[in-house]
Amino acid sequence: MSASRTGRTPGRGGAAGGGPRGPVPSSRERILGRVRAALADVPSDEPAVRAPGRGFADSHAAGPTLDVFEDRLRDYKAQVRRVPADRVAAEVAAALDRRGAQRVVAPPGVPDAWFDGAAAERLPDSREEPLSVGDLNGVDGVVTGCSVAIAETGTIVLDGSPDQGRRAITLVPDYHLCVVRAEQVVDGVPQAVRLLDPARPLTWISGPSATSDIELNRVEGVHGPRTLEVLLVEAAP
Amino acid sequence: MSATFLGIPPFPEAARAAVDDSRTRHNLRRATHTIRDKRASVVGELNDDWQLLRAEGAAVKEHTLRHLDRYLEQLEESVTRAGGRVHWAADAEEANAIVTRLVKATGETDVVKVKSMATQEIELNNALAEAGITAYETDLAELIVQLGDDLPSHILVPAIHLGRAQIREIFLDQMAEWGTPAPPGLTDDPRALAEAARLHLRERFLRTRTAISGANFAVADSGTLVVLESEGNGRMCLTLPQTLISVVGIEKIVPTWSDLEVFMQLLPRSSTGERMNPYTSTWTGVTPGDGPQEFHLVLLDNGRTDVLADTVGRQALRCIRCSACLNTCPVYERTGGHAYGSVYPGPIGAILTPQLRGMSSAVDEALPYASSLCGACYEVCPVAIDIPEVLVHLREEVSAGRGHLGEKALMAGAEAVFSSSRALGAAQRAAGLGRNLVPGHLPGTAGEWTDTRDVPDVPAESFRSWWNKRGKGQR
């Protein structure tokens, strides 16, 4: 056992920046100084940039992408309907109708065409003219698009684009109807990470709100929307 | 939370009381076995790639730690550029003072919290309470622990030691004192309990203007913070308030956004045994018109640089707090988390806590021994922390110090005997002759070992002696 030979390195907790007669070092200087002292064993010429090793596959899904996506969404208790492109408005109207939703929020980038035929009132919301949280708490649901979706994990990612809106609008209402275009669905997590822009605020959603905190069994429906419905839009036949 | 781990006796004593509690053992056994099976199933879906992901996760974290000064500076720059403010806290006291000052500056006396191990570690809620600020825990399990004035016993599910009936009682007894009361006629159906938590916290989420969180990852190149959660309480806290303060250990850094390709696969599957947790939020500084308009990142050392200085123990800082090691550990399953006397229980706690606290107490010195060294924790660790190796290393530190002198003497004697063929032969012959005199229970220090075991039978003849006698022609 080599542990005793490779134990604490010298200089542990050693002097930080500032110097003996200098001003009292800031915590920033002290912490960075302690980190550097702790890393005395790291060769100074060791490259500080590492080439990532990505020997693993981009996805592990068995089957056609959209089938896997649908299966995984259902597995985590989301509702899914596969719809042809020319039926989106009819399906949005039908979904809101089934839900009994009368007042729904939609961010500005959601096409008016999606609401053709919907009986529900569309409430606008934007970064410039946001609804209050109280208003959001009183609406019957929210309709958005998405940025990317991941088949293998049944995940939808929102990035705050105009058809997805502020983060609050997909959080406070109890019902989220999300329209996902087939070409937005990738097979695995790595592909999604590559497509996403970290500068935007992202929300990854995998099924409705849930908890495993009681006896480690998953129960759906806590603080986020308790119903997630996905319309998966494929090219019209 | 006013409860504290202060004063809890060292592991062997605390564990004895815990294993006598049959209700807790039942709760723990049920919960840990449920999650073990779920994890095994979703890890299995990734086939051979799991080991590749695990190796890459370990390598990314190890590389980051070896160049941590560089990545800390890069993270600070990225967060600042995106409109966040970065604060550095050398220890718990400083972190608590910074957060208290920031909350006071908002003028608020109530804050909502996302579950965070770092803020548990520094006992932030107590510090805020002393300053007249009430911190409301919003994660369901944390809420249960807070309402019950209890202590967390698990990294992911702090109320894992409680069953549904106990949770129902706590809700009925305590919710009214903290805000919206539990609905009358509340049952112990987990759905009803989750609904009660939703009702209890709803108003608070909508009106509280300051939130405190931790983070699962802090991405150096983009300045992005990442929080994985399930319930939506995290989203509420990260989205609705005006001010967000995140307390993050300095070891939470990953170098690049693309590293999330690895960790967003490793963490959910290891943690809750899901392909993906219901919600993950990422944010980079502030976004005008969307979410908190003031963001503070508090970078916490609090002993981490001491762990970093130990070239064997350093690997404990790779930990992504998934809790797979707790769920699989035969010791944790029987004792539960409280016996470890630390917010970090289980195998990872047994190596992390004594290092963070500097092996400064009898509790810390006992922790490296809270293991049978079976290695199950290492097998499931998504960043391949060799927990048994660190446990043995820390035991060496303990035995080199003041504690466990009996074991040290026994091992020194054993070394003398085993290092000499002649001495070993003599000892074995003597043992063979005296074999009928060995008692079933040993005296002194060794007696603790035989409290739960029988002394093995001493054979009439040693293997070495038998081998030597077996005619040379047969070899």
Image (spheres, grey):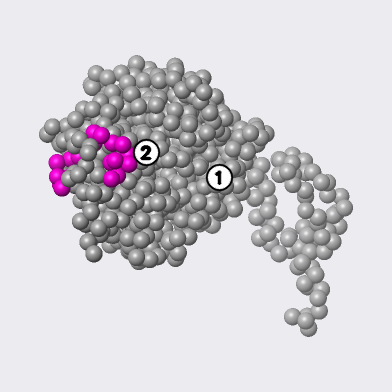
Query: How far apart are labels 1 and 2 at the CA level?
Result: 27 Å
Residue B22 appears in which quarter of the rendering? top right
Q: Quadrant of residue B333?
A: top right
* Residue B105 coordinates in the image, percent (x, y): 23, 21
List x then y, in percent, for residue A65.
Answer: 33, 62
Q: Quadrant of residue A210?
A: top left
- Residue A99: x and y in percent read 32, 39
- Identified at 34% across, 65% down, the residue is A64
Closer-to-camera residue (B335/A75): A75
Q: Which residue is mark 1?
A: B32
Instruction: Assign a secondary structure to mark 1.
Output: helix
Residue carrying label 2: A226
Q: Report the magenta residues as a range.
A: A94-113
Residue type beneath disc 2: Arg
Q: Position of residue B115 (x, y in %)?
A: 39, 34
Examine the structure image and report whether residue B120 is included in the region drawn in magenta: no
Q: How many residues crowd mark 2 within 10 Å: few (<14), some (14–19), many (20+)?
A: many
Tell me: A179 left or right of A42: left
Left or right of residue B161: residue B323: left
Q: Nearer the viewer, residue A170 or B26?
A: A170
